[in-house]
């Protein structure tokens, strides 16, 4: 699965620890998600995304297998859901999924 990452999982040490895959950080590729802003998740130090026309969020895309995806989903927890998004990359637009919390949780 192709993921768009924009928060703590961009940190290579966090990504390795949470995915269980030492080589994943090398596969991160810069990407931008147009139409969304990164905001705080109410009551936590973590970010989420909210739709905001005219805004964009920088991050990275990463292709992960099932075992890494399961571990990352456990890390993200019940507050987040994988949502289909269309991101811009150097090679052009691609479809991916991004973890987002419900709008009412955005701070």
Image: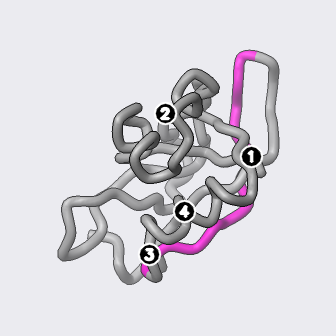
> Label 2 belongs to which residue?
58
Does residue 93 show up magenta in the picture? Answer: no
> Label 1 belongs to which residue?
2
Q: Are marks 1 and 4 in contact (CB under 8 Å)?
A: no
Q: Earlier in the sequence, mark 4 or mark 2?
A: 2
Figure quadrant of the C terminus: bottom left
For label 1, count other residues whose C-alpha is less than 10 Å away and answer few (under 14), some (14-19) or many (20+).
some
Q: Earlier in the sequence, mark 3 or mark 2?
A: 2
* Residue drawn at (70%, 46%) of the image: 64
Q: Is residue 103 above or below residue 9?
A: below
Q: Earlier in the sequence, mark 1 or mark 3?
A: 1
Mark 1 to mark 3 CA distance (whole Å): 19 Å
Q: Are marks 4 and 2 in contact (CB under 8 Å)?
A: no
Is residue 24 rendered to the left or right of residue 9? right
> Label 4 belongs to which residue?
71
Mark 4 to mark 2 CA distance (whole Å): 23 Å
For label 4, count other residues whose C-alpha is less than 10 Å away and answer few (under 14), some (14-19) or many (20+).
some
Counting labels gives 4
> Label 3 belongs to which residue?
77
The location of residue 84, given as percent across then percent down, is: 73, 61
Does residue 85 show up magenta in the picture? Answer: yes
Q: Quadrant of residue 70?
A: bottom right
Mark 3 to mark 2 CA distance (whole Å): 22 Å
Segment tinted magenta in the rendering = 79-90
Q: Is residue 4 above or below residue 10?
A: below
* Residue drawn at (64%, 36%) of the image: 61
Q: Nearer the viewer, residue 42 or 71?
A: 71
Q: Is residue 81 above or below residue 60?
A: below
Q: Earlier in the sequence, mark 3 or mark 4?
A: 4
Q: Earlier in the sequence, mark 1 or mark 4?
A: 1
């Amino acid at each position: 699965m192709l993921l768009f990452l924009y928060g703590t999982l961009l940190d290579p040490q966090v990504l390795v620890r949470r995915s269980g895959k030492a080589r994943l950080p090398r596969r991160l590729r810069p990407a931008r998600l147009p139409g969304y802003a990164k905001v705080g998740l109410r009551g936590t130090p973590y970010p989420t995304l909210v739709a905001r026309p005219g805004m964009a969020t920088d991050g990275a895309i990463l292709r992960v297998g099932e075992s890494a995806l399961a571990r990352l989903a456990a890390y993200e927890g019940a507050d987040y859901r994988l949502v289909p998004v269309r991101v811009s990359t150097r090679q052009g637009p691609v479809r991916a999924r991004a973890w987002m919390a419900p709008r009412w949780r955005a701070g």
